Image (tube, rainbow, N blue to C red):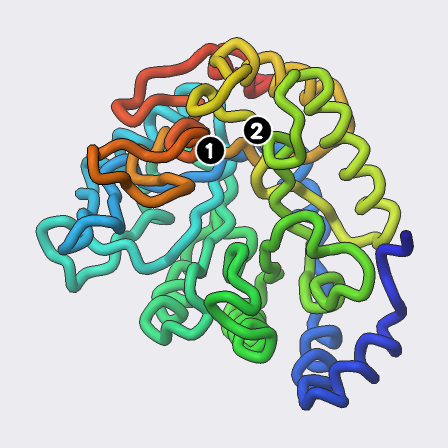
């Protein structure tokens, strides 16, 4: 299977849908700086959502600054120096009209690199907050959207938001979809300054750590051969519970073995998220099996380390 078509072919196709001019503007923006590629390779990255954040409650449960400071201190103490967030519009628990300034806290804690996430490319308030975060030196780039293309937003809205952040901040910008969305005829290659897919061996049927690492490395090698743009997997990992053949020891072995490959990746994720579930709650209060979504963290929800934390960052 071929995984990429030429830029000319992509532009011709998108012009027919009215998006060619937008895409061309994106492609003419400056490519990622060398420092970004260095950061992607040399920092130990983790995907982060605050432990005290729960969007399923009414009203939404927001974290405090102290919650985030404790989260990030635990991660930094474990050796992580790169942070990836999912949104720029987390509010403060006591002042819900005020945006939680995670980059400021991360910089004070000692993180060296931060990729700022934008959850909703069509949210003006979130885009404004993301632009303001550019004032912090640790911000190396932006990731707009996460597995939402043609679900929560369309390509035109996504590209407009990405171009806006490029122009406003001068930083490289990307987006994230599932790894199979980067296969043949995908515009994701052209609109992104670096390639940032989610690649989960669990959802491809691999739970044995060595088989899961083999699948991850094979997919990475395939995608890396397509383009000279930097490639890093935004989400890789194994959950520790919620299905058969899952455990902390298997998660730890997966990451330990993955470190021995050439795959660059972000650990998914920092903390367990009890509010995440694959299915809807049943009348008895339980959720359909399997239900691994609450268990992807390398720390529990109350910040207790799992086995993987001991060896996950090479220089800790």
Q: Residue at x 49, y 14 (%)?
A: 247
Q: Earlier in the sequence, mark 2 or mark 1?
A: 2
Q: Can you give x and y, in whole percent of width and height, for residue 104 in the image?
A: 33, 48
What whole-number distance in Å separates the C-alpha atoms at marks 2 and 1? 8 Å
Q: Are marks 2 and 1 in contact (CB under 8 Å)?
A: yes
Q: Residue at x 25, y 45 (%)?
A: 54
Q: Nearer the viewer, residue 256 or 313?
A: 256
Name above or below for residue 183 compared with residue 46.
below
Q: Residue at x 69, y 81 (%)?
A: 25
Q: Can you give x and y, in whole percent of width and height, for residue 243 in the image?
A: 48, 23
Question: Would residue 261 be visible to someone looking at this image?
Answer: yes
Q: Is residue 39 left or right of residue 122?
A: right
Q: Can you give x and y, in whole percent of width and height, for residue 95 in the image?
A: 11, 56
Name above or below for residue 102 compared with residue 311.
below
Name above or below for residue 182 compared with residue 286.
below
Q: Residues within 10 Å of mark 1 (few under 14, many from 20)?
A: many
Q: Which residue is mark 1?
A: 269
Quadrant in the rendering for residue 41: top right
Q: Which residue is mark 2?
A: 237
Quadrant in the rendering for residue 171: bottom right
Q: Is residue 25 left or right of residue 272?
A: right
Mark 2 residue element? loop
Question: Would residue 167 be visible to someone looking at this image?
Answer: no
Q: Nearer the viewer, residue 119 or 106?
A: 119
């Amino acid at each position: 299977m071929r995984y990429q078509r030429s830029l000319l072919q992509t532009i011709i196709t998108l012009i027919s849908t009215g998006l060619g001019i937008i895409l061309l503007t994106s492609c003419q923006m400056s490519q990622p700086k060398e420092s970004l590629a260095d950061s992607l390779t040399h920092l130990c990255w983790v995907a982060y959502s605050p432990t005290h954040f729960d969007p399923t409650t009414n009203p939404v449960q927001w974290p405090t600054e102290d919650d985030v400071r404790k989260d990030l201190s635990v991660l930094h103490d474990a050796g992580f120096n790169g942070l990836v967030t999912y949104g720029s519009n987390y509010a403060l628990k006591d002042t819900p009209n005020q945006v939680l300034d995670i980059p400021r806290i991360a910089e004070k804690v000692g993180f060296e690199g931060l990729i700022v996430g934008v959850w909703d490319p069509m949210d003006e308030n979130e885009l404004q907050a993301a632009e303001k975060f550019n004032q912090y030196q640790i911000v190396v780039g932006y990731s707009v959207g996460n597995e939402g293309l043609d679900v929560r937003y369309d390509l035109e809205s996504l590209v407009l938001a990405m171009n806006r952040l490029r122009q406003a901040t001068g930083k490289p910008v990307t987006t994230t979809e599932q790894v199979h969305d980067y296969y043949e005829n995908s515009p994701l290659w052209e609109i992104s300054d670096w390639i940032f897919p989610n690649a989960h061996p669990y959802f491809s049927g691999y739970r044995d750590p060595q088989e899961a690492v083999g699948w991850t490395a094979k997919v990475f090698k395939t995608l890396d051969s397509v383009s000279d743009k930097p490639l890093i997997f935004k989400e890789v990992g194994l959950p520790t519970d919620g299905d058969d053949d899952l455990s902390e020891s298997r998660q730890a072995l997966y990451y330990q073995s993955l470190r021995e490959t050439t795959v660059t990746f972000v650990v998914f994720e920092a903390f367990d998220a009890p509010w995440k579930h694959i299915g809807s709650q049943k009348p008895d209060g339980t959720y359909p099996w399997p239900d691994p979504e609450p268990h992807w963290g390398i720390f529990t929800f109350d910040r207790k380390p799992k086995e993987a934390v001991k060896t996950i960052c090479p220089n800790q």
